[in-house]
Image: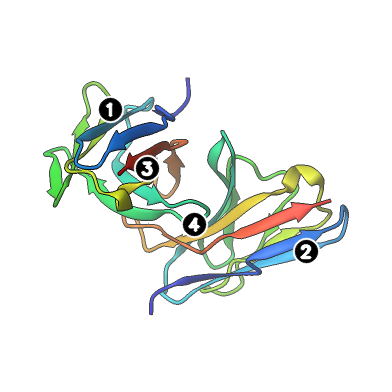
Amino acid sequence: EAQVTQNPRYLITVTGKKLTVTCSQNMNHEYMSWYRQDPGLGLRQIYYSMNVEVTDKGDVPEGYKVSRKEKRNFPLILESPSPNQTSLYFCASRLFLGTEAFFGQGTRLTVV
Amino acid sequence: RKEVEQDPGPFNVPEGATVAFNCTYSNSASQSFFWYRQDCRKEPKLLMSVYSSGNEDGRFTAQLNRASQYISLLIRDSKLSDSATYLCVVRLGSYQLTFGKGTKLSVIP
C-alpha cells in the first residue's frame, strides 16, 4: 500500500530535549516536505527536499533541521524544542510537478 | 496580501443543499491548483485537481478563473459525510505548494 508513515503520532516533551520525528514514504517520490498546522494559521511549510541531499527552507524553518540521506526518509529534527513549537506536524511526499501530494497521518507534538 | 485566501466559514448547511467555496490567489504565475479535504485532526487528502476548462467528479465541480485569479468548488446534494475542512492549494514554482487556511463545512441533518 502506497503511504507516508510518520512516527511518533503523539509526543509530549520538555523544553530543550532534542527530538526527531521520522517520515518514510514507499512511493519512490523525489519531493518531500514538512508542514506544521496551527489553529488560524493553516499549513505552513517548514522544510522541503527535492531529492537526496537536496533540502531547502520553507516559510517557517527556524528551530528545525532536516536531512535527506535516502530517498524514502526525511526526518525532522528539533535540536532544542520550545513551547512555540507545539503543533500538529505533517510530512508529505510528491512525485513531481503538479502531482498529488500524499500526507502522513500527522504528529501531534506538545512541548512543555 | 496573503498568497491564497479562503473564507474560513464555518458553512453550516442542511443535507441536500448546494454549497460553493471560493478561493483567491495572489500570484498570476501560479501553475497548478487543487482542492484538498481535511477531516478533523486527520491528514489532508486530495479531493480534485482544478483545470482551466473546469472539471467535475460526481457531486463536486471545480472551476478556475485565471483572469480573476480565483478557484471555486461546488458541492451539490450535500451529505453528512461531506463535513470537513476544504483546503485550496496552489503551486507556483517547481515544487512548493501554498495552502489556504481552509473553509470548514458542517452538513446538518
Residue under label 1: B70
**Label 2: how many residues lie within 10 Å, few (<14), some (14-19) or many (20+)?**
some
The disc numbered 2 marks a residue on which chain? A
Indicate the secondary structure of the residue bearing disc 3.
strand
Which residue sits at x=37%, y=42%?
Answer: B86
Indicate the secondary structure of the residue bearing disc 1.
strand
Which residue sits at x=39%, y=57%?
Answer: A101
The disc numbered 3 marks a residue on which chain? B
- Residue A81 placement (x, y as % from top left): 81, 52
Residue under label 2: A19
Q: CA distance from mark 3 to mark 4?
A: 12 Å
**Res B86 label:** 3
Q: CA distance from mark 1 to mark 2?
A: 40 Å
* Nearer to the camera, A28 or B6: B6
Q: CA distance from mark 3 to mark 2?
A: 31 Å
- Residue B52 placement (x, y as % from top left): 16, 37
Quarter of the image with the C terminus of chain B in it: top left
* Nearer to the camera, A97 or B64: B64
- Is residue A94 positioned above or below B65 on the image? below
Q: Do discs 3 and 4 share a chain?
A: yes
In front: label 3 or label 2 = 3
- Residue B55 placement (x, y as % from top left): 14, 45
The kind of residue tagged 4 is Lys
* Nearer to the camera, B2 or A54: B2
The disc numbered 4 marks a residue on which chain? B
**Label 1: how many residues lie within 10 Å, few (<14), some (14-19) or many (20+)?**
some
The kind of residue tagged 3 is Tyr
The kind of residue tagged 1 is Tyr
Indicate the secondary structure of the residue bearing disc 4.
loop
**Res B42 label:** 4
The kind of residue tagged 2 is Leu
The disc numbered 1 marks a residue on which chain? B
